[in-house]
Each structure stands twice: as C-alpha cells, then as structure tokens.
Amino acid sequence: ISALKQRFADVIPETRERLARLRKEHGNKVLGPITIEQVIGGMRGIKGLMTETSKLDAFKGIKFRGLTLPECQVRLPSAKREPLPEAMFYLLITGEVPSNSDCDILVREIAERSETIPEHTVRIVNSLPQHMHPMNQLSIGVLSLQTESKFVRAYNAGVKKENYWEYVLEDSLDLIARIPRIAAMIYRNTYKDRRLGPTDPSLDLSANFSKMMGFENEHFWELMRLYLTIHCDHEGGNVSAHATHLVGSALSDPYLAYSAGLNGLAGPLHGLANQECLKFLLKLQEKTGQNPTEEVVEKFVKEILASGQVIPGYGHAVLRVTDPRFVCQMEFAKRVMPKDPLCKLVATLYKVVPRVLKEAGKAANPYPNVDAHSGALLVYFGMREFDFYTVLFGVSRAIGVSAGLVWSRALGLPIERPNSLTMANIEEYVSKS
Ligand code: FAM
C-alpha cells in the first residue's frame, strides 16, 4: 500500500466524523438566501456544493487545502524549481504536503501506471480524424479507457459503499498517469508525424509528457510542471469540476465522470478561453509590431472594447485581484525568457488593460486571469497549435477533479439532485409572496 493511500485511509475516519457531526448538530441551519436572479443566472453565488480539495478566495486566489499558490510553490516538492503536479495530487488527497520521499514514491507509481494503455485505446485514438478538435479526441480517449475501471469491477462484485473510495482512487491514479500519453498521441497525430517521443521511466509525469509530445527542452518540462500544477483545481463550482462531480455522484466511474468534465472544459466560456487569448495576442502583435508602446496598445484595447468585444484573459467571476496563476507565469517568463517579445507584450497589456477596464467601469474585476499568459509561454517553446492548449488544461484538471471524486466517495456523498422550477412555478411563487 502506497504512502498516499495509507495516509488517506488514516484521515478518512476523522473526516467522516466531522461531517457526521456537522450534519447532526447543524444540518438544518441556513447557509444563505437564494434569489430568483440566482436561479435564472446560472446559480451564481449560491452556496450549494461541498468540495474539499480547494477554495477560491476573491483576494488571495485559489487555495489548495488552505495553501495559496505561492505557498504551494515554496512547499511542494519539485524536480528543479517548479512544484510537481504529483505532489499537488498528494496534497489534494491527504490535505498534507508530502515529504520528498513520499512524493518520489508517488512519482514512480504514476510513471509505472502510465506504461500500460489498452490496445483498443491506442487504436481508437489513432483512428480519429485530424480535423476533429483535440478536446473531442481527448474525451473519446478517456472514455475508451473506461474498460479498465477497477471501480466498476469492484462495484459489480458488490464492494461495500464505505470502500468505494479505494477503487475510485485506483482509477484516478490510472487516469492521471495515462491521460498524458493520450494527450501526447493526439498532439503527434494531429500536428506532427504520429510518432511519440521516447519516455524515460526515471522521470516525472510532466517531463515524460513533454518528451512524448517531442519537447526535449528542460525549461519546457519545468513549464509543464508549473502549468499542470496551477490549472488542476479551482474549487467545485466551475463547469469541469461540477460536471465531473455531478456525473460521479451517479456512481459513474472516474473515466465516465471526467469525460463529462472534459466536454465542459471544451466550451469557449471555460477552458477554450486560453486559445482565444493567444489569438488576441497574435492579432495585437500583427497590428502593432514587436514592441509596441503602452499608448499604441491602449488604443488597440480601446478599439476592441468600442466594438463590443471583451478583452480575453481579463476579468473573473469570483476573483477581484490579479490571478496568482497569472503572476507565477509572468515570473517564469521573466526568469526563463526575459527578452521574448510576446511575453513582453503580455507585460505591456498588464500595465494597460486594468486601467482601461477600470475607466470603462463595467468589469467587476479588471485584472488578468490564468489564461492571459499561458499561450505566450507555450509559443516561446514552439507549441503554436493553440487548438491544443485546452488539452493541456484537461491533463491538469484531471488531477484536481479526480481528487474531488475520491473525497466524494470517501465521504459517501449522495447523488446530486437539485430541485428545478418552471417559470410558471416562479411566477406563482412571486404572485403569492
Ligand atoms: N473585457 C471587456 N468587458 C468585460 C471583461 C473583459 N475582459 N470582463 C467583464 N467585462 C464586462 C462583461 O462583459 C459585462 O458586461 P455586460 O454587463 O455588458 O454584459 C460586465 O463587464 C460585467 O461582467 P463581470 O461581472 O465583470 O464578469 P462575469 O463574471 O460576468 O464574467 C468572465 C467573467 C471571465 C466571463 C468575463 O470577465 C470575460 O468575458 N472575460 C474575458 C474572457 C476570459 O478571459 N475568460 C477566461 C475565464 C477563465 F477564468 C477560465 O474559465 N478559463
């Protein structure tokens, strides 16, 4: 039994007790009102989900098990400097920062699990047409892995509810280990020569993922470690996390559940936004040249706003400060590629856009989000295929949402079934109140 599984098994009883106490002593307390506007408006702000892995703070950004991103960068084990996504999974599952040796065991375990991919998955992914969006290919690939689900086998064999988590954890580890290989196959099939780069069993998930895609630059491996760590989780209400949780609540296995999450991530208002950001940057560069002044950039930004479009990469539904995930990518750029014109353009936009958006007075948050930077970093290393960027996001998000699934099963959370109303129901309620 691995350190991760043992540690998780240790913390489950006390967490179950906490939950039971909360339910028993406070179960009928009211957490907040629900307005009709919220019911119509995408349930914004309704406190209606319990997610253990992370919590978004409007001013500090995402907290993973209580740790801010800068704290994670300092405390999580690394291969060189950036935190390892494997360490993040350990943190999300156990609530504790792993020791270097426990993290190493997990890195090795995931590397071993990544070696085996069913033959039919390889055949299915290789048969997909090149013009199919990489996100659709990823979702199909993940779904095809479902034949391997240990949870399904255990469930059919009648395993007890209190032990579901063990098999969901097994499936999650397999999924996290295998999804990079599927993503790399999609990258090579869609844009390159269909041959995967060689892996090295002594390396971590991010390095091998990069190698399979054909990136041998070790700075790119570091970028992947950072990228896969910072995109993994953003509390429970976002579309990919919520969709995964919802489908998992029907006791669909992690492959079925995450495939659903990926389908949500593929939407332009969610994960696809990062490719929009890069398009915007390239358009700006094309129009204004390599090193435009702040004045020139400001003019361009104002024109975009005047034409009724949004500035991609800026604003957020919850955050009210610069996204710390933007900040750490900007720091990476300053360290690794200080002279890169596209990253400099990102920095110039950062000086200009918040001021312009504040002046315009509409956006609740005029600061950049995670998507404002990632494309420029990837382009620097030669990954210009921006249709693929959301797949990277998907590889990362598997870590957070499967940790969420493991917790949901460990706590025995029930099937999700909110009440829905017709417009007539609401009108009737209003007429009586
Ligand atoms: N540029 C121009 N106007 C903006 C804006 C931006 N970047 N962000 C918000 N606004 C406008 C918004 O369109 C709305 O105008 P209307 O009242 O005319 O509809 C007004 O400001 C109030 O919106 P809000 O309350 O500040 O934002 P929301 O919570 O409704 O929406 C976002 C949040 C992220 C969808 C929105 O800020 C946006 O469209 N940003 C640009 C696209 C983007 O960067 N998406 C990435 C999101 C990312 F975090 C992710 O999920 N991957």
Image (tube, rainbow, N blue to C red):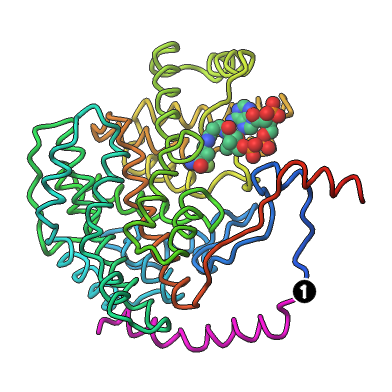
Q: Is residue 354 visible?
A: no
Give the residue at x 42% y 76%.
94
Is 35 placed above or below 245 here?
above
Q: Which of the pair 78/114 is nearer the observer? A: 114
Where does the image place residue 422, in percent across and percent down from the top left?
71, 45
Where does the image place residue 33, in percent across and percent down from the top left?
79, 58
Count of marks placed on residues? 1
Where does the image place residue 44, in percent across and percent down from the top left?
67, 48
Where does the image place residue 431, in percent across and percent down from the top left?
90, 45
* Magenta region includes residue 12: yes
Q: Quadrant of residue 342?
A: top left
Q: Quadrant of ligand 1?
A: top right
Is 265 placed above or below 417 here?
above
Residue extent of the magenta highlight: 1-29
Q: Which of the pair 166/108 is nearer the observer? A: 166
Give the residue at x 47% y 33%.
268
Q: Quadrant of residue 361?
A: top right
Secondary structure of the residue carrying numbered label 1: loop
Question: Hey, what amino acid is under mark 1?
Answer: Lys
Q: Which residue is mark 1?
A: 29
Give the residue at x 37% y 40%.
333
Give the residue at x 45% y 64%.
250
Q: Residue furthest top?
A: 287
SS assignment for the magenta stretch, majority:
helix
Is 392 placed above or below 3 here?
above
Q: Quadrant of the N terminus?
A: bottom left
